[in-house]
Amino acid sequence: MTMNASPEKLVIRNIGLILSGRLEAPIMDGDCVIAVDGRIAAFGHEKDLDTADATTTVDANGVTLAPGLIDSHVHPVIGDYTPRQQQLHWIDSTLHGGVTTMISAGEVHLPGRPRDVVGLKAMAIASQRWYEHFRPSGVKVHAGAPVLETGMVEQDFKDLADAGVKLLGEVGLGSVKDGKTARQMVDWARKYGIQSTIHTGGPSIPGSGLIDADMVLETGADVIGHINGGHSALPDDQIVCLCENCLKGIEVVHNGNERAAVLTVNTARELKQMNRVILGTDGPAGSGVQPLGILRLVAMLSAFANVPAEQAFCFATGNTARERNLDCGLIEAGRAADFVLMDQAQHAPGRNILESIELGNLPGIGMTIIDGVVRSGRSRNTPPARRLPEVVPD
């Protein structure tokens, strides 16, 4: 008779502040989080929780715990390598920026990528497979996101879905450029459970083109990709129009227009639809590898769009998890035990971490945890934190 292995139990104690990822209640009461076999099992005050028999104990030393950050818009290629920048280990560097999950907007930076339908489908399925089986530094990369090419028919989307593909790359990066054709293909994708994102704004790479508000609305994709441009944003009136006339996810990226990003968030606030705002980097791209891109967006929007820091973190956690149908991003029983532990940077102004971020400063990251496993310690990319969490020796 084979005995089941004992469950892996993670206890994180002595937490100074817990950010929930939930926009409606971004700060939680408590000082302890428990995960069992990679899933959140309990949270609250340590005195009220069963912390016995932990296989790993982390003493947070009073720092802040938040759900692991989610980058809603990346362009991975193969493994932890991007040929566009000749960069190795960019995903690992992004982990050191607090990101534990990434969403592909298309594997378009692969030199010689196929544009015929057979090759396109083969590459998408292969991309989905290799990131399913290989997680660089533990980071969850949801990939296999084909861009729309002329000649695709409904059966192609069924084939992709049957093979495990769940995402479309940015509409507009392939050869399909008109709204009517794109709408038909987006509807086919949705029929088979594939989520779509549309390029928004001016051209980004050779072969892409202007996607204006009319095409975004006609196409009806599930996420308005980089509404603040990637790189060039649409005119203000078109950004406001999209926020007002579309109920889809509104994605703001680091590789875009900062002023347009602030306009977007201010408009979402006026519409009382801040729950639609999600964050991405759009990297690696012409702006390079951006390992701190999500943190920088959180600080920038908090400082310039007057968003309380605890809510700005929700844009990169719970909001994105809900829009992208992910099992992480919230401190909630049953969710993936993905966390970032951080503190106010040394010598940074502000009375605490939240006030410091609202003044535009980055926090210092001390640890990342994915599926209940410690993946990194003190960040090599953020400014040093005032305090650091530590794994308690057995």
Image: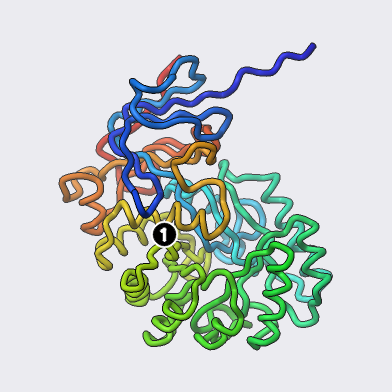
Secondary structure found at label 1: helix
Q: Residue 216 at x, y = what percent?
A: 55, 81
Quadrant location of the N terminus? top right
Q: Is residue 192 visible?
A: yes
Looking at the image, residue 129 sits to the left or right of residue 382; the answer is: right
Q: Residue 179 at x, y = what percent?
A: 63, 86
Q: Residue at x 46, y 69 (%)?
A: 250
Q: Give the farthest residue toward the top.
A: 1
Above or below, 117 relative to 70: below
Q: Residue at x 50, y 31 (%)?
A: 41
Q: Residue 331 at x, y = what percent?
A: 44, 41
Image quadrant assignment for residue 263: bottom left
Image quadrant assignment for residue 290: bottom left
Looking at the image, residue 323 sits to the left or right of residue 160; the answer is: left
Q: Is residue 258 visible?
A: no
Q: Residue at x 69, y 74 (%)?
A: 187
Q: Which residue has dot 1 on it?
A: 293
Above or below, 74 relative to 261: above
Question: What is the three-letter code of the residue carrying label 1?
Answer: Gly
